[in-house]
Image (spheres, rainbow, N blue to C red):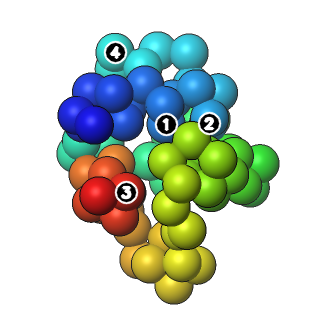
């Protein structure tokens, strides 16, 4: 999976309409759309679409989309 593919999945899960505005360096917690529901949706996306478990401690440490992408690898 490429970072571009991951960003598209992330944007869909977090209900972010303008995925093209996102980059790996985007600090996702600073996005207007980011809330607890978006966080749960991203965790669910990891489990259902990527078949990966996203440890809560690692998720809390993540700041950028690149950080999340590294956890998806």
What's the residue at 34%, 15% (across, down)? 20
Give the alpha-carbon distance from disc 1 to disc 4, as whole Å. Answer: 12 Å
What's the residue at 61%, 56% (across, down)? 47
The answer to whether 44 appears left or right of 28 in the picture is right
Q: Label 1 belongs to which residue? A: 10
The quadrant of the image that shows the C terminus is bottom left
Tag 2 and tag 3, C-beta contact below 8 Å: no
Numbered circle sitting on residue 14 = 2
Numbered circle sitting on residue 18 = none
First in residue order: circle 4 vs circle 3: 4
Pick out the residue farthest to the bottom: 57
Residue 64 higher or lower than 24, as above or below? below
Q: Residues within 10 Å of mark 3 (few under 14, many from 20)?
A: some
Could you tell me how many numbered marks the image carries? 4
Q: Is mark 4 on a helix, strand or loop?
A: helix
Q: Label 3 belongs to which residue? A: 72
Question: Picture quarter containing residue 63?
Answer: bottom left
């Amino acid at each position: 999976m490429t970072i571009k593919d991951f960003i598209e999945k992330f944007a869909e899960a977090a209900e972010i309409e303008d995925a093209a505005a996102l980059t790996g360096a985007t600090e996702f917690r600073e996005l207007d759309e980011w809330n607890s529901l978006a966080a749960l949706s991203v965790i669910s996306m990891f489990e259902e679409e990527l078949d990966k478990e996203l440890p809560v401690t690692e998720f809390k440490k993540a700041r950028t989309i690149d950080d999340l992408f590294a956890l998806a690898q």
